[in-house]
Amino acid sequence: MKKWLSVFLIFIFMSVSVEAQTRWKVQPGAKVTFKIKNAGFNVDGSFSGISANILFEAGQLAQSSIEASIKANTINTGITARDNHLRRSDYFYVEKYPLIKVNSQKIIKQGNQYLGYFNLSIREVSKSIEIPFTFSQSGDQAVFSGSFTLNRRDYNVGGWSMVLGNEVQIFLQIPVEKE
């Protein structure tokens, strides 16, 4: 009987340790910023309206997951006419595709940072991408930071252009708090 009780307690302990993932909530004001060349000049912009379901524990990466979305209509380059054009069907087509989404497939430790394998969906296109990031925690607060480059044309955002670059640099600075 004691043997069965011991096995039962070990099972319960293992179940609790698997469920011990920390759930994080994105803080208001979090943004994803970007940079792209236009007519030879860098154009900076941002997206806000981030919502996410984040389960992340540095010691339990196999059970960690990140699902997030950004409202495409929150694009802001500082020029209203340009922002309105970017919301139209030839770019983000926000009426038909209101969200840009990422879902982690796997997260691994790589040196002093992490590497996330994500599925990124923009418009009607979903592609696998890798995003290197850091996670800095202080008590109940933390920040996910990272950057990566993507080709806007891979996601059917804008067509061919002599003046608009294809490569977009994306910068993540996402403050979070334990739920």
Image: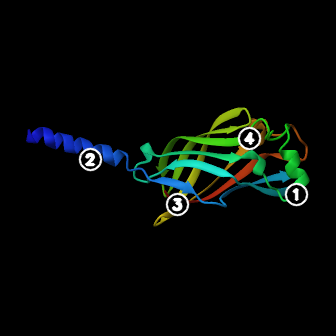
Residue 89 visible in the picture: yes
First of labels 4, 2 by sequence position: 2
Quarter of the figure with the N terminus:
top left
Q: Could you tell me if the residues under marks 4 and 3 are in contact, i.e. CB atoms within 8 Å?
A: no
| Local secondary structure at mark 1 | loop
Tell me how far mark 1 sits from mark 3, CA to CA: 32 Å
Pointer 3: residues within 10 angstroms few (<14), some, or many (20+)?
A: some
Residue 98 got which mark?
4
Return the x and y of residue 72 as percentages of the image width and height.
75, 46
Q: Amino acid at mark 3?
A: Glu
Q: Quadrant of residue 166?
A: top right
Pointer 4: residues within 10 angstroms few (<14), some, or many (20+)?
A: some
Of labels 1 and 3, the one closer to you = 3
Q: Could you tell me if the residues under marks 1 and 3 are in contact, i.e. CB atoms within 8 Å?
A: no
Residue shown at 79% from the left, 41% from the top: 92
Residue 79 got which mark?
1
| Local secondary structure at mark 2 | helix
Label 2 belongs to which residue?
Answer: 13
The colour scheme is rainbow
First of labels 1, 3 by sequence position: 1
First of labels 4, 3 by sequence position: 4
Return the x and y of residue 23 as percentages of the image width and height.
48, 52
Label 3 belongs to which residue?
Answer: 177
